[in-house]
Image (cartoon, coloured by chain):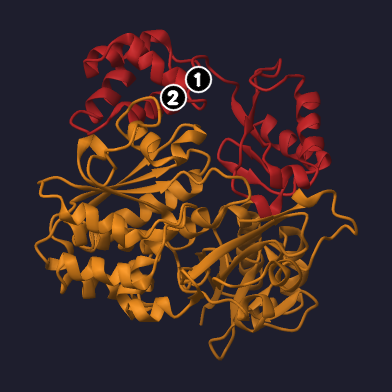
Chain colours: A orange, B red
């Protein structure tokens, strides 16, 4: 029987040699005559352990080893990697690592686990349950669910997502749009990128639900050009979803149309501002528009437009799947739900941590990040939390 | 890659045909032209403007607004060095200085042998594996000056 081997295709993992490690594993397996099936997944978010290699053992558990650079592969294979044998670099089940076990992964639940562009794996892990429920609801009911969840814009301004949606829903026009702001330009931020590379179908489902809710038939993902890997993953996933009827003129046989296109930015930081982004999508210089009118009333091509950040839209499927109350029960005060937090810079364990609102900086820096590898941080900017 | 004028013309016409009917087609057209022809030359601007019923000034205004679009052909490979805060916190400026020295150019320049064009990037989104460099579409993390040397050596012959 073929042994299942998981290794990330996330850009961060690739930047540390994941592709070369994958190739070395194929070579080593062939040399031993051990049949393996290599599955490229997103990143678990523990960047200090990348390239992370997970081996499915005889009982079906995924046993992780990391960091596994390509040079280490021959020695590891000799030491029994394919049998999930003990080794100093064996970290065990990812779910048992404190860094991972202490997280509350809602939006990132599938990232690092499934093949990001496989509709079958997406479905097997709870994908499209939210959309199917939404298709049985009225637009007003869907918007109410998002409002009740307490979800606020994750792009930074924290405007209630449901209020944006309600404004678009109320507009009585034929053409409306859904736009995803994937111009993640602030330094130290990479959660949008990880989600788009690791679970693009989740974003696609969130945008589809938005379209069904307000009666928009077309969506655009405006992606910064510094993220070519995310662009490839999104295009593959959109094609896969369309081939299975989850996008197109008749979404899941509902008679409702919704389709998506990825549009690349061109190196302009201002496009993170939503009205500048809309100008850019229209093919103009990205200059900020005067408001009013709001994009929800006159947005893309002058039509009512939902424009939300990647994580806001990718949080919608679980809200529809589990209900507003489930999501709202995470968090504190007016900040409901979870937030993917990025640890980077001069820190021992950099990566992505998804936690309910309320986690302290001390927990993030010491419990998760393990503080700085060098004794004295060079400046207060040495760590970055976003 | 040298492209003859005739090839360039037919490529541009094909790109314009492929984007006919698309909503807001200018940026996708400019991306396609740069991907296939290396840059967006004044002659391209004139033809794109005519095809979209825009003025040349409008198209030029868009091309010159966005840092990513080039009006001159780059070297065979583009090296982007991330200059954002997470990379700076991990001594990215050393990598940056080394890149300039190794290639003998400042940002925007192309090495004398025509192989590499050096560009700054303001976050490549690889902040937990800083400092970061991207060569064409290949991303590299924890790039020390020594690692940069081996990366450049690897790409020099591609």
Compared across the picture, whether A348 is left or right of B54 comes to right
Q: Are marks 2 and 1 on the same chain?
A: yes
Q: Earlier in the sequence, mark 2 or mark 1?
A: 2
Residue that label 2 marks: B34
Please report the residue visible at 35 percent of the width from the left and 32 percent of the height from the top: A289
Residue A194: x %, y % from top left? 52, 58
- Residue B18 figure quarter: top left
Residue A366: x %, y % from top left? 76, 70
Mark number, residue B70: 1
Say above or below: A249 vs B99: below
Contact between marks 2 and 1 (CB within 8 A): the answer is: yes
Say above or below: B129 vs A2: above
Describe the element under mark 2 as helix, strand or loop.
helix
Residue B24: x %, y % from top left? 26, 31
The subunit letter for the residue under badge 2 reads B
Gap in Å between the C-alphas at discs 2 and 1? Answer: 7 Å
Looking at the image, which is closer to me, B42 or A163?
Answer: A163
Looking at the image, which is closer to me, A249 or A270?
Answer: A270
The subunit letter for the residue under badge 1 reads B
Residue A315 in sight: yes
Please report the residue visible at 19 percent of the width from the left and 47 percent of the height from the top: A176
Residue count near mark 2 (Cα–Cα under 10 Å), binned few <14, some 14–19, many ≥20: some
Please report the residue visible at 68 percent of the width from the left and 80 percent of the height from the top: A98
Looking at the image, which is closer to me, A329 or A40?
Answer: A329
Please report the residue visible at 69 percent of the width from the left and 68 percent of the height from the top: A364
């Amino acid at each position: 029987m073929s042994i299942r081997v998981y290794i990330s295709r996330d850009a961060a993992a690739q930047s540390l040699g994941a592709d070369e490690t994958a190739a070395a594993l194929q070579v080593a397996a062939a040399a031993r005559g051990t049949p393996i099936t290599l599955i490229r997944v997103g990143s678990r978010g523990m960047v200090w352990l990348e390239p992370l290699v997970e081996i499915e053992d005889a009982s079906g558990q995924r046993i992780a080893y990391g960091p596994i650079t390509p040079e280490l592969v021959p020695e590891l294979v000799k030491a029994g990697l394919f049998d999930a044998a003990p080794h100093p670099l064996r970290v065990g089940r990812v779910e048992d690592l404190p860094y991972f076990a202490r997280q509350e992964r809602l939006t990132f639940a599938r990232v690092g686990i499934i093949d990001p562009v496989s509709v079958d794996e997406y479905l097997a892990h709870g994908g499209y349950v939210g959309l199917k429920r939404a298709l049985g609801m009225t637009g007003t009911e869907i918007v109410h669910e998002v409002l009740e969840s307490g979800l606020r814009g994750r792009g930074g301004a924290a405007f209630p997502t449901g209020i944006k949606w309600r404004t678009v829903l109320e507009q009585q026009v034929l053409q409306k749009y859904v736009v995803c702001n994937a111009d993640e330009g602030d330094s130290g931020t990479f959660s949008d990128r990880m989600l788009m590379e690791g679970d693009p179908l989740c974003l696609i489902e969130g945008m589809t639900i938005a379209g069904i809710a307000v009666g928009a038939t077309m969506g655009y993902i405006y992606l910064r050009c510094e993220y070519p890997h995310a662009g490839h993953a999104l295009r593959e996933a959109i094609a896969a979803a369309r081939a299975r009827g989850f996008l197109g003129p008749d979404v899941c046989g509902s008679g409702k149309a919704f389709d998506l296109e990825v549009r690349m930015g061109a190196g302009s930081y201002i496009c993170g501002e939503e009205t500048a982004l809309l100008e850019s999508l229209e093919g103009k210089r990205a200059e900020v528009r005067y408001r009013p009118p709001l994009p929800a009333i006159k947005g893309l091509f002058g039509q009512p437009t939902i424009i939300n950040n990647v994580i806001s839209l990718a949080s919608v499927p679980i809200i529809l799947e589990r209900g507003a109350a489930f999501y709202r029960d995470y968090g504190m005060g007016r900040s409901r739900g979870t937030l993917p937090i990025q640890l980077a810079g001069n820190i021992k364990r950099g990566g992505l941590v998804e936690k309910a609102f309320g986690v302290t900086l001390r927990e993030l820096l010491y419990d998760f990040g393990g503080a700085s590898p060098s004794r004295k941080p060079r400046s207060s900017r040495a760590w970055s939390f976003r | 890659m040298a492209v003859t004028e005739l090839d360039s013309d037919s490529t541009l016409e094909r790109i314009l045909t492929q984007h006919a009917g698309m909503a807001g087609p200018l940026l996708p057209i400019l991306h396609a032209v740069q991907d296939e022809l290396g840059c967006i030359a004044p002659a391209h601007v004139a033809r794109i403007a005519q095809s979209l019923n825009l003025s040349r000034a409008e198209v030029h205004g868009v091309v010159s607004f966005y840092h990513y679009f080039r009006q001159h052909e780059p070297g065979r490979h583009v090296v982007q060095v991330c200059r954002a805060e997470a990379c700076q916190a991990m001594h990215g400026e050393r990598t940056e200085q080394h890149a300039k020295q190794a290639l003998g150019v400042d940002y925007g320049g192309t090495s004398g042998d025509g192989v590499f064009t050096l560009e700054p990037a303001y976050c490549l989104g690889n902040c937990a594996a800083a400092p970061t460099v991207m060569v064409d579409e290949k991303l590299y993390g924890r790039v020390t000056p020594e690692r940069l040397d081996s990366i450049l050596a690897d790409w020099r012959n591609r």
